[in-house]
Image (cartoon, rainbow, N blue to C red):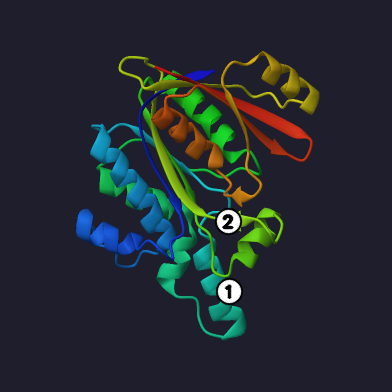
Amino acid sequence: MKLYIKAFSSYRGNLDEFDVKKELKQRYKRDTRRQDRFIHLALYGALQLQDKIDLKQDDELYITSGVGNIDVIQKSNISVNENKDYLKPFDFINMLGNTTSYHVATALGLKGKNIFQISNNFTFINSLISIYASLNISKKEAIYGCVDLATNPQSLIKRVLGVSKETEVLSAVNYQKLSLNSNKAMASIEFDTKSYSLEEVNTLVSKSESKVIYSDKDIYFETQASYYINRAIEQKEDLFYIDSFEDKYKIVMVDIY
C-alpha cells in the first residue's frame, strides 16, 4: 500500500517550555476557551499544516494518539475520586476523542469524514491502513494528525505506556496531507498489514539502501513514526522505519522526491 505526502507539520518538545495556548491566541487568533492542552496541541499542528498547503472542505480528517487526552482523565479522576467533587461538563466532553476532531475540523473549515482513532499498539500504521482503504473508495485526500501529550507527573503516562522510569516522554504533534495522487508530492510512504519477525526485519534491513530507524525507547511518544517520517522529508533522506511491540515488528518505507 502506498500513499503520497503533499505537506507536513511537526512539533516535538516539552510543553512546560512552550506555551501552545499563547501561540494559538497570538499567532492564529484562536479562541481557546473550554479547551485543554491536548486539544491545543492538535490545533497547533493542524494550523501549521494549513499554513503550508491549501486544504479542501471535503478532505478527510484522521487523528490518532497513543493514549488520547490523558490530562483531562487525570484531572477528572482527582476531582471525583480524591476531592469527592463532581465531574465538570467540559472535562467530560473533552475526554471524548471526537471532541478534538471536532475542534480541528472547525478550525480548518472541513466538512468531510472525521475520525478519531486509537488502536492497541501500532496505532500510526493501523490508522494509515484505514486511510488508504477509505481514500480508495472516496478518491479524496486526507489530513492525518498524530497527537501525544506527556502528563505531569510523567510517571502516570509511563505506567500507561509501559515504558521504563528512565525513559523521557515528550509531547508531540505531527500532521501529513495524504493522497493517492503523486502529483506535487514531497514523498511517498509505503506500508502493509503484515507483522514481521526480528529475523525477517534484519533481512530487509540488510537489503535496504535507506536510512534505518528503530522506534526510540529512550525518548518516547507513541506515534513517533509520524515525527521521523516528517524529519526524513526535511532532511531529504529515504527512510526505513521499524516499529515494534514485544516480538512483533511493522515497517514503513519513505521515498523522498
Residue 121 visible, this orientation: yes
Question: Which residue corresponds to mark 1?
Answer: 77
Give the number of callouts.
2
- Rendering coords of residue 75 (x, y %): 52, 73
Three-letter code for the amino acid on which mark 2 is drawn: Val
Q: Nearer the viewer, residue 69 or 86?
A: 69
Q: Nearer the viewer, residue 1 or 45?
A: 45
Mark pair 2, 1: CA separation: 21 Å
Q: Nearer the viewer, residue 97 or 255?
A: 255
Location of the N terminus by quadrant is top right
Question: Which residue corresponds to mark 2?
Answer: 169
Location of the C terminus by quadrant is top left
Residue 234 placement: quadrant: top left
The answer to whether residue 23 is above or below residue 255 is below
Which structural element holds mark 1?
helix
- Rendering coords of residue 171 (x, y %): 49, 54
- Rendering coords of residue 25 (x, y %): 24, 61
Which is more foreground, mark 2 or mark 1? 2
